[in-house]
Image (cartoon, rainbow, N blue to C red):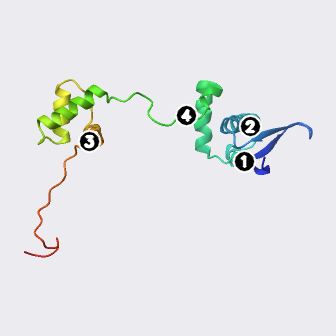
Amino acid sequence: MVADQIFFVQGETPKRRFPVNLKDPLQKRYEMIREAALCKKPISEVCKTYGLSRDMYYYYRHKFDEGGMDALREEKPGPQKPSKRTEELDNKIISLRFDEPELNIYQLANRLKKAGYDISPRSISRVLADHGLTKKKRTQSSGKAPFEKG
């Protein structure tokens, strides 16, 4: 292991040392909180040792106070709740697009809300894009560059 990834917390005597692996996020967070609680150094100095800001110290300290060691584990990225998009809803959006192609995504969202579905216009846009059903913007082609006058 590289020397700058590990440092030692010094105890009361020279032989009392404890290695801290800075590459392990859980250990890094816990040791920062523990050291700040037990030593008389300013919080900013402890944070500098661990390469984190004071804001992050207080964030992790609050999480630790609320949930212990488990709360310090890295959070899984991504959505925290299941998607509102179901196959049934996707099919409803697609059928509405074919039945009434002149409706835009906002009008589709209103129709679906009236039918009891809770979906945003952006989600409708994603469904339509996933199935290649987006509307193309039409431009008039006069053969001249847009900045030229008629």
Mark 2: amino acid: Glu
Front of the two marks 4 and 3? 3
Give residue 28's position: percent from left, percent from top: 69, 39
Q: Residues within 10 Å of mark 2 (few under 14, many from 20)?
A: some
Residue 49 tag number:
1
Q: Residue at x 60, y 28 (%)?
A: 71
Numbered disc 3: secondary structure:
helix
Numbered disc 2: secondary structure:
helix
Q: Residues within 10 Å of mark 4 (few under 14, many from 20)?
A: few
Return the residue at label 2.
35
Q: Nearer the viewer, residue 109 or 140?
A: 140
Front of the two marks 2 and 3? 3
Q: How far apart are the two marked residues, 3 and 1, measured between alpha carbons?
A: 48 Å
Mark 3: amino acid: Ser
Mark 1: amino acid: Thr
Return the residue at label 3.
125
Q: Residues within 10 Å of mark 3 (few under 14, many from 20)?
A: some
Q: Earlier in the sequence, mark 4 or mark 3?
A: 4
| Residue 40 visible in the snapshot | no
Give residue 149's position: percent from left, percent from top: 10, 75
Q: Residue at x 79, y 45 (%)?
A: 7
- Position of 147 with respect to 21 (left or right) is left
Return the residue at label 4.
75
Q: Earlier in the sequence, mark 2 or mark 3?
A: 2
Give the quarter of the figure containing the C terminus: bottom left
Q: Residues within 10 Å of mark 1 (few under 14, many from 20)?
A: few
Q: Are marks 2 and 4 in contact (CB under 8 Å)?
A: no
Give residue 20's position: percent from left, percent from top: 77, 40
Mark 4: amino acid: Glu
Q: Are marks 1 and 2 in contact (CB under 8 Å)?
A: yes
Q: Residue at x 27, y 35 (%)?
A: 120
Q: Residue at x 76, y 51 (%)?
A: 4
